[in-house]
Every structure is written in structure tokens, then in C-alpha cells.
Amino acid sequence: MNTLKVLIILILFVGAFQGIVFGIILFRTKQNLLSNKILATILFLLSYRLLMQIMRLFGLGYYDTWYYFMLDLSWVTGPLLYFYVKSQIDTKYKLTPKEYYHFIPLLVQISISIFVRLQNLYWDGTRDSLSWLGYWGYVVWMNYPTIYVVASMLIILYSHLALKLLNNNANIQQQTLRWIKRIIFSFQIYFSLVLLILIIDVLIYNVVLEKNYFYFIRFFYYPFFIGISVLIYWLGMEGFSRRNDKNSIPKSQISEEDRMKLELIAKELLDAVKERKLYKIQKLNLNMLADELDTKPYIITQCLKEIIGKNFNDFINEYRVNEIQNLLKQPENSKFTLLSLAMEAGFNSKSSFNRAVQKHLGVSPSELKQNL
């Protein structure tokens, strides 16, 4: 065994070992039970894939007994990331039967993998010994990076859905939001790069150059698994360091149907306040805002709480503070006092203006003017 192969085995083993160790710790952590178990499962699956590759480097798994047990289960990683985010957002989240369709890709992957492996029972070394489907199924599944192309696409898709879910939940703490997004972004960026390389390589090598394609001897084959090893280590460290963090997002008491209605109202509310600059009305209140949207004040309050994650004053004052900053940047406003500009932005008193600037920007009004 040459030095390079030994080094690759060592790197992959360290990644797999870390993933298994962190996974066991997360699985046994009592805080945030479901989210930690989902993250542990992701680590176990990624580690298992590395162990499969290590076995192949030792000559195990090539058409021997191990061959029929070494199934790649990568098509479930994307859905698990999505469920992980849902469990972080809702402490009481439980997988419902209607969400089982997310596991269809995994079942398809297992079914195809078993079918392809069974072809070895009929193959006698000639193409004629296999059916058309058996032959091309084997070629596409085993010689091409089909498994990882589909896995990458699923991870990118579910990462997008997970980020959308995070962005629609304003109640989550910023610190928690940032580190969860780091995890999702890492998967999204890494597997976008993997997908791009795989597709370009197949098109150039196989289609343009018309050469026989074997994925497992391409130049990026081992770097791909080394990247997985690094991802496992970083993911395990992130999950391990925050395994006991208390989830700050309570379970919503509204139904999905009501939430969808509130989301529509929230969009109308944001458009109305921003485009029509309703925040510049000094006496603006909930009743006036409700009249503008032709709805009830309590619905506006519920919309602010459940969807936008702010109370009425903070919501409006944030726009007013932003307006002040824009006004101060305009040279023609230098002749006006700060208080007069505050009134122009919608504030009705000096005290409310001072409090809003301090709360939203963390500086005093005088510092605000100096910093621009």
C-alpha cells in the first residue's frame, strides 16, 4: 500500500471516527432530543460512507460478500437537514405521517442499488447475459456519479427549503439563527461545487471526448471524500458545542391554514408600510394600519407576533430609524436639526426618538449623526 493511499485512509478514518463519536454524544444528549438525534443520524450516515470507502481501499467490497451490504444512503441527507431545522424551530416538533414522502428518494435509492447489485448473480462476463435495463442500470449506477449528482441536487433543494423556513420565523434568536444558517450554507455551497464539478466532468470526458467513463478513477474522487471528512468534523463540533442550548422558539398555537393567511397579510403589511411610507404618519396606530389593509387590529397584532416577530412600536420605529439615517445622508438636510428630521421620519417626540435609536442601533442620537 503506497504512502498516498495510507494518508487518504488516515484522513477518512479520522473523519469517520469523529462523526461516530460526536454522533453518539449527540444521540445521548437529553436537551433538544429530536434535533440532536437528527444531527447525530446525519453524522452517522456520512461517517458510514467514509467507512465504506476505507473498506474499498483495503480491497473489501469489490464483488465479495461485503459488496451486497455496502449501500450508499446519501439521498436522505437533504431531508434530514430540513427536519433538523424544523426541530430547531419547534421544540415540540414531531415527524407526521404526511411528511413521510420526504423519504421516497431514500427508498428509490435503496431499490435501485439492490437491483443493480443483483445483476452480478446473472452476469457471466458478457453483455448479453444481462437485460437491457440491467446492463444500463449497472453502467449508469456504478460507472457514473449518478448517486452523488442526485444526492447533491437533493441537498441543495432541501437546504433552500430549510433557509426559507428559517427566514420565515422571526422569533428565533439571532445567535441560534446564525449558526444554523452556517450549517445549511456549508452543505449548500459544498454540494453545489460538487454538483458543478461532476456535471462538467461527465460532459467533457464522456460526451465531448467520447471516452469510457469510470467515476471512481476521476481526479476528484478522493478529494470529494476528504471534503466529507472535513464537513463531518466541523458539523460535529458545531453540534457538540451547542448540544445543550435551549431552543428559544415556542411551538406556534396557530394552524398551518391560519399561518398561511397571516403570511399573506404580512406581505401586504410590509408593502404598505414600506412603499406608502405609512411610518411617517406621527399618529399612526394599529387601528389606522388595520383600516389601510381592510382588516381587524387584532389580526395585525397577531401577524406582527407570529410572522414578523415584533410588536407594533418596534416594527414601525425600525422604519423610522432607517428613514432618519437616509435623511442624514442627504447634504440638503444638513441645515435641519436632528429633532426636526426625526419628526419628518414619523417620530412624535424627542424621547420616543431617543429610545428608538438606542434600541435599534445601540447608539445615542448624537453618535448617530457623527457616525454618518
Image (cartoon, rainbow, N blue to C red):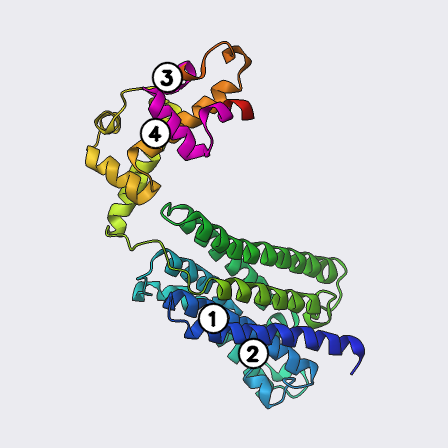
Q: Nearer the viewer, mark 1 or mark 2?
A: 1
- Displayed quadrant of residue 86: bottom left
Q: Secondary structure at mark 2?
A: helix
Secondary structure at numbered mark 3:
helix
Q: CA distance from mark 1 to mark 2?
A: 29 Å
- Secondary structure state at the residue bearing disc 4: helix
> Which amino acid is tagged 3?
Met
Image coords of residue 34 (percent x, y): 38, 67
Residue wearing tag 4: 316
Q: Earlier in the sequence, mark 1 or mark 2?
A: 1
The Cα–Cα distance between marks 3 and 4, rounded to whole angstroms, is 14 Å
Q: How far is mark 4 from mark 1, CA to CA?
A: 42 Å
Name the residue type under label 4: Ile
Query: How many angstroms separate mark 1 from mark 3 (CA)?
Result: 54 Å
Residue 341 part of the magenta segment: yes
Residue range in magenta is 340-368
User: Which residue lies under the disc numbered 3?
Assistant: 343
Report the predominant secondary structure element of the magenta stretch: helix
Could one spot residue 342 in this view of the protein?
yes
Mark 1 surroundings: few (<14), some (14-19) or many (≥20) residues within 10 A: many
Nearer the observer, disc 3 or disc 2?
3
The residue beneath circle 2 is 116
Tell me, for residue 40, which label it has, or none.
1
How far apart marks 3 and 2 lie (CA) works out to 72 Å
